[in-house]
Image (cartoon, rainbow, N blue to C red):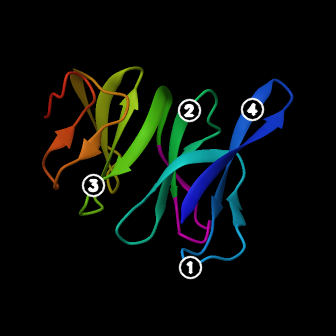
């Protein structure tokens, strides 16, 4: 199980990413200053790096044990990353609009449709939270 918890620091609250066995047991800190994460089909994790007030300027990916962290996109106001079922792309909100980044190439496809928390319905349909539009 993957979850994030708030942590107070000077200037506000930040988030830390934790993991715990589904069958129960002790929670383990996976990464500081990370949150709003999603598992990919291969077990890797996509997360917001240094989230503040539910958004971040960077989306990263790492192995399920927290190693090999690598940048996917930067320079926006990113929210709620969601990995495609085939594990090749990540959908997310960027300043109120939906976008998709290809994990292998880092190519970004923006959409002119509002959506802070896009979700996948299969590999080729993205559901966004703006009046139930799907693209």
Does the magenta-highlighted stretch encompass residue 67?
A: yes
Residue under pointer 3: 84
Compared to residue 2, the image places residue 96 above or below, namely: above
Q: At 62% from the left edge and 76% from the top edge, which residue is drawn?
A: 24
Q: Which of the two discs, 1 and 2, labels the residue nearer the N terminus?
A: 1
Q: Position of residue 92 (x, y in %)?
A: 37, 37
User: Element type at marker 4?
Assistant: strand
Label 2, residues with CA under 10 Å away: few <14, some 14-19, many ≥20? many
Query: Which mark lies nearer to you, 3 or 4?
Result: 4
Residue under pointer 2: 56
Q: Classify the position of the N terminus by image quarter.
A: bottom right
Q: At 58% from the left edge and 55% from the top edge, which residue is drawn?
A: 3
Residue under pointer 1: 23
The answer to whether 42 appears left or right of 45 in the picture is: left
Q: Which of the two discs, 3 and 4, labels the residue nearer the N terminus?
A: 4
User: Element type at marker 1?
Assistant: loop
Asked if the residue at tag 3 contacts the one at tag 2, i.e. Cβ–Cβ closer than 8 Å, the answer is no
Q: Position of residue 90 (x, y in %)?
A: 34, 48
**Label 1 to label 3, Cα distance in Å?**
26 Å
Query: Which mark lies nearer to you, 4 or 1?
Result: 1
Q: Nearer the viewer, residue 84 or 109?
A: 84
Q: Tell me the magenta residue range.
A: 62-72
Q: At 22% from the left edge and 26% from the top edge, which residue is drawn?
A: 111
Q: At 70% from the left edge and 68% from the top edge, which residue is drawn?
A: 27
Q: Position of residue 110 (x, y in %)?
A: 26, 29
Label of residue 13 in the image: 4
Compared to residue 82, the image places residue 50 above or below, namely: above
Label 1, residues with CA under 10 Å away: few <14, some 14-19, many ≥20? few
The answer to whether 58 appears left or right of 25 in the picture is: left
Q: Classify the position of the C terminus by image quarter.
A: top left
Q: Which of the two discs, 4 and 1, labels the residue nearer the N terminus?
A: 4
């Amino acid at each position: 199980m993957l979850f994030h918890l708030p942590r107070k620091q000077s200037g506000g609250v930040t988030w830390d990413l934790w993991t715990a066995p589904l069958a129960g047991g002790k929670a383990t800190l996976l990464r500081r200053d990370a949150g709003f994460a999603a598992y990919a089909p291969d077990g890797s994790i996509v997360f917001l790096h240094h989230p503040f007030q539910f958004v971040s300027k960077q989306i990263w990916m790492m192995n399920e044990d927290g190693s090999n962290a690598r940048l996917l996109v930067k320079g926006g106001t990113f929210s709620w990353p969601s990995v495609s079922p085939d594990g090749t792309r990540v959908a997310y909100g960027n300043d109120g609009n939906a976008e998709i980044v290809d994990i292998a190439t880092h190519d970004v496809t923006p959409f002119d449709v509002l959506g802070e928390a896009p979700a996948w319905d299969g590999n080729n349909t993205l559901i966004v939270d703006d009046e139930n539009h799907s693209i």
